[in-house]
Image: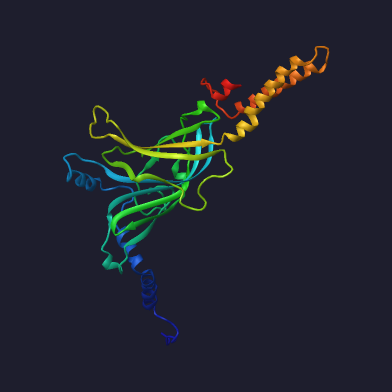
Amino acid sequence: AGLRSPFEMSPLILFTAATAAPTAYNGASGRLRSALLASYDKGVFPWEVAWEAAQADGPERSGLEVEMGINFHRVHSVDVVNHATDMIVWYRLRWHDPRLVWNASQYGGLTTLQLWVGDGTGAGETSEIWTPDMTLWNQGESMQTSLSSAFASVSSDGTVFWSRPGHLRPTCKFVGLDSFPFDELGCTMEFGSWSFSGLYLRPVKMDAGFSIGGSETAGESFQEFSLERVSCRENVYPPYPGDPENDWPVLLYEVVFQRAWQPYTRGYILLQVVLNIIGFLCFSVPPQCGERLGLGITALLAAVASDFVIAAKLPAAREMTWFAQFS
């Protein structure tokens, strides 16, 4: 064998350098991430931990409490004809995962760690941790696609906080449309676990359960609908007769939208009044005047055209609105 060049490194030294460099650059965060996720299964949750915690306070088992809070950023659209709404929100969940607990003193005082959740669920291909399957039951579009993917913030005590911006698009059973155009439309959104009963997951309010605005870009301007008020309450559907432990808890958000009635007053209601006055003024025109019939027909056609414009903004339903009775 020939002499080794002084610039040529042995394979052992190269292997050692290649394996040692990532550890040095990752630091405490890298070591913590490796330790937490080494044997972590994102497809399951240790339900027995939640049951033991519940039985410490009472004789019955109960599911993991998942706190839910929604910040309503602005109203994007309200489609009365198709019974749908679109709201820009910040959707937040918080729960406790006992597998994500660590001693901060062993990791340079690190008390929080950001772990990725992709595709809107912990079961996503790129996700790193388990997430509860909180779902909008009366959804027009899945929350997995309407909300952005985001990191979850994990605290050293195992608390996971997952906040995502995006859209909520529920299908609504509107309340209050009979007062159109002076109506306040109410829409109820129902959130709960789709796969797990209350024995496994229990959605509860995070503080009040909701907040409104909070940033410079929140709210509406030059828009037909604005957010008037929000309320949140907890509801529990009873278990099936043969399965007494499995009730179905949900969170009900009642959202009320205020319609801008001024354009309808200026453009339609006053127009109807004027057209009716013109229609009656036709009788004051002498019969021998040829414009009498033309004026009456023009006023009638204009009133009908105004009704067509309003009808396009309302669903074809058996209920009567205030405007329909007025016109």
- x then y, percent, for residue 65: 29, 45
Q: In the displayed structure, would residue 239 be above or below residue 94?
A: above
Q: Is residue 5 left or right of residue 221?
A: left
| Quadrant of res 279 | top right
Count of labels in the image: 0
Rendered view: 170 above or below 26: above
Pinpoint residue 120: horizontal percent, then vertical percent: 42, 47
> What residue do we see at 30% from left, 67% from top?
109
Quadrant of the snapshot with the N terminus: bottom left
Q: Is residue 138 visible?
A: yes
The C terminus lies in which quarter of the figure?
Answer: top right
Say whether residue 212 is left or right of residue 314.
left
Judge whether residue 194 can be spotted in this image. Answer: no
Q: Give the quadrant of residue 255.
A: top left
Q: Nearer the viewer, residue 66 or 36?
A: 66
x and y, in percent, of residue 163 in the image: 41, 51
Left or right relative to 273: residue 290: right
Residue at 22% in and 46% down: 48
Q: Nearer the viewer, residue 87 or 273?
A: 273
| Residue occupying the point 33% across, 43% down | 205
Nearer the observer, 147 or 253: 253
Residue 17 % position (x, y): 38, 75
Q: Residue furthest top?
A: 287
Left or right: residue 39 compared with residue 126:
left
Q: Colour scheme of this structure image? A: rainbow
